[in-house]
Image (cartoon, helix red, strand yellow):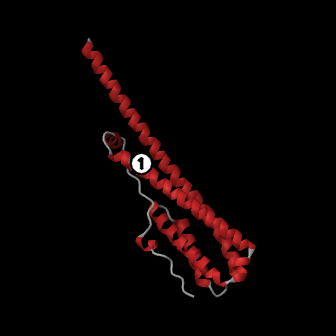
Amino acid sequence: MIGTIILIAVVVIIIGIIVGLYNSLVRLKNEVENSWAQIDVQLKRRTDLIPNLINTVKGYMKHEREVLENITKARSALVKADSVKEKAKAENQLENTLKSLFAVSENYPQLKANENFMKLQEELSSTENKIAYARQHYNDMVMYLNNKIEQFPSNMVASMFSFKEKELFEVDEKDRKPVKVNF
């Protein structure tokens, strides 16, 4: 009789541990997905601001057409990107082209003084900060989830229920170099 009670207690404890580990994996997976959604929200915000910025700048920078075209191409690539890796690459490309635009704008005092341009530049700067924070938060959540998937005993539960590691939001090596702007 005591042996049966002990066996039932052990089974209940094991089931409790499995349920707890499963629930923590689900929570982390959902946090990763939510973190990615937050990045998407900020990237969408930035891509929505860009046409306004381009229209404001066009009148001042007619001969800087290549810069504006590169921004448009980078924005399109970001909108079309599907995977974390594709979005990261497109987002970094867009960030670099925006840096080029703001560097080139230094040659246009009237543009720098334009209220719309200043507001858009401020909005984009604020959005860039939010994107950086969202990327950091996403990567933190991915790290927590991936650690949980790899650590014992949660790795057994993760394997049983097909939890997969997520991809970090990384910067390409070429995008780590400073932007060069030639006048």
Residue 81: x and y in percent read 50, 65
- The image quarter containing residue 162 is top left
- The image quarter containing residue 66 is bottom right
Residue depicted at x 37% and y 45%: 148
User: Is residue 85 placed above or below 176 in the rendered structure?
Assistant: above
Q: Residue furthest top?
A: 1
Amino acid tagged 1? Tyr
Residue 123: x and y in percent read 66, 65
In this view of the protein, which residue sits in the foreground, 16 or 124? 124
Residue picked out by circle 1: 144
User: Is residue 93 placed above or below 159 in the rendered structure?
Assistant: below
Q: Is residue 59 visible?
A: no
For label 1, count other residues whose C-alpha is less than 10 Å away and answer few (under 14), some (14-19) or many (20+): some
Q: Residue furthest right?
A: 115
User: Is residue 131 placed above or below 69 in the rendered structure?
Assistant: above
Residue depicted at x 53% and y 74%: 96
Residue 53 appears left or right of 172: right
Assign the C terminus to one quadrant of the image: bottom right
Residue 146: x and y in percent read 38, 50
Assign the N terminus to one quadrant of the image: top left
Residue 58: x and y in percent read 68, 80
Residue 124 appears left or right of 169: right
Q: Secondary structure under badge 1?
A: helix
